[in-house]
Image (cartoon, helix red, strand yellow):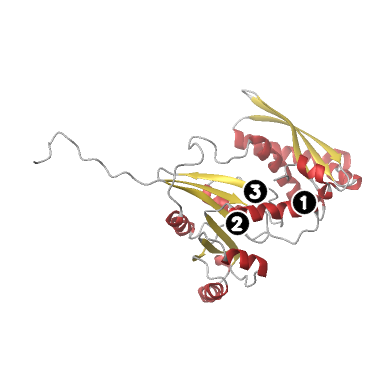
Amino acid sequence: MAPSPFILPLRPQMKHQSGFVNIIGKPNVGKSTLMNALLGENLSIVTNKAQTTRHRIKGILNNEQYQIIFSDTPGMLKPVYKLHEKMMEAVDETLTDADIVIFLIEVKETKIEEELLTKLQFLKVPVLLVMNKVDETDQETIEAQAAHWKELLNPTEIIPISALHKFYLDVLLKKIVQYLPEGEAYFDKDDNLSDRDMRFFASEIIREKILLFYQKEIPYSVEVKIQSYKENQDIDVIKAFIYTARESQKAIILGHGGAAIKKVGTEARKKLEEMLGKKVYLELTVKVIEDWRNDEQSLKRFGYDS
């Protein structure tokens, strides 16, 4: 019997893909820049200083056919403080709960620690080796490096990019989707771009300005904690504590007559207002917790307990 002309044929149902794509690599290799570029939003701090990212930050990229949950992780380093140990625990987590691992390197990078090499080789999920900053070299070097890493690690894919200039990011995204598992979305697609709340991003913005405006050990001895965050229709009122490890560091952060901390507050407030689209009142107070980077209680208080 011929089909009735009044019954429309069923459209084939499109499969939906969803998964966790975790980005690992050395400090200052461009992990935060890459995640921000893929998302089209600045969720992670980006500076020219190493160890900028301390916490694991998830960014969510939604499409009608997929949901990708990216994780920007702290740069891999040899721990000096208990803080570093907690940061490296966050990196290890990304290797156990990933659906896809992006191992980000600089294009001229040739070495990998034996322990990490073994971990990557034994992973049961796709490993995409992404060579960043290819704009700083030539095609011959890129091809030679790809051959080197193919022999050394034998990753699922080798993809050259420039995260800063957004070169080849479309190719990288297609590869991610290619290996993304089928499944329903983990997060509501109408929600924000991250699983983190504004208290977290407010503290990160303040810490970003400290990284930019202070030198040497100061940025690495500082932690920011939001004491209170009150949302109002016309203005958000934020009070934050900046913790340092020594009294001498507190004096440097404050600056002569409070000029230095005022600059931090002004620039952080401007960025918060740009992000929120409304006025912000920001109050900063500097406190001292001696050697907080080695204190378990302080680390737990600052969110390094996972």
Point out residue 53 in the picture as x, y percentages from the top left corner: 68, 51
**Disc 2, SS:** helix
Tell me what residue is drawn at x 32 percent, y 43 percent: 13
Check if mark 1's residue and mark 3's residue have beta carbons within 8 Å: no
Alpha-carbon neighbours of circle 2 within 10 Å: few (<14), some, or many (≥20)?
many
Badge nearest the viewer, 3 or 2: 2
Looking at the image, tell me whether mark 3 or mark 2 is earlier in sequence order: 3
In the figure, residue 200 lies in which quadrant?
Answer: top right
Q: Which residue is mark 3?
A: 56
Mark 3–mark 2 distance (CA, rounded to whole Å):
12 Å
- Location of the N terminus by quadrant is top left
- Decide if residue 34 is in sight here: no
Q: Residue furthest right?
A: 247
- Residue type at the position of mark 3: Arg
Mark 1–mark 3 distance (CA, rounded to whole Å):
13 Å
- Residue type at the position of mark 1: Leu
Alpha-carbon neighbours of circle 1 within 10 Å: few (<14), some, or many (≥20)?
many
Q: Which residue is mark 1?
A: 83
Q: Which residue is mark 2?
A: 95
Most foreground residue, 206 or 97: 97
Relative height, residue 283 to residue 186 (above, below): above
Q: Residue furthest left?
A: 1
Check if mark 3's residue and mark 2's residue have beta carbons within 8 Å: no
Relative height, residue 50 to residue 190 (above, below): below
Most foreground residue, 255 or 95: 95
Looking at the image, tell me whether mark 2 or mark 1 is earlier in sequence order: 1
Relative height, residue 210 to residue 166 (above, below): above
Alpha-carbon neighbours of circle 3 within 10 Å: few (<14), some, or many (≥20)?
many
Point out residue 227 in the picture as x, y percentages from the top left corner: 76, 32
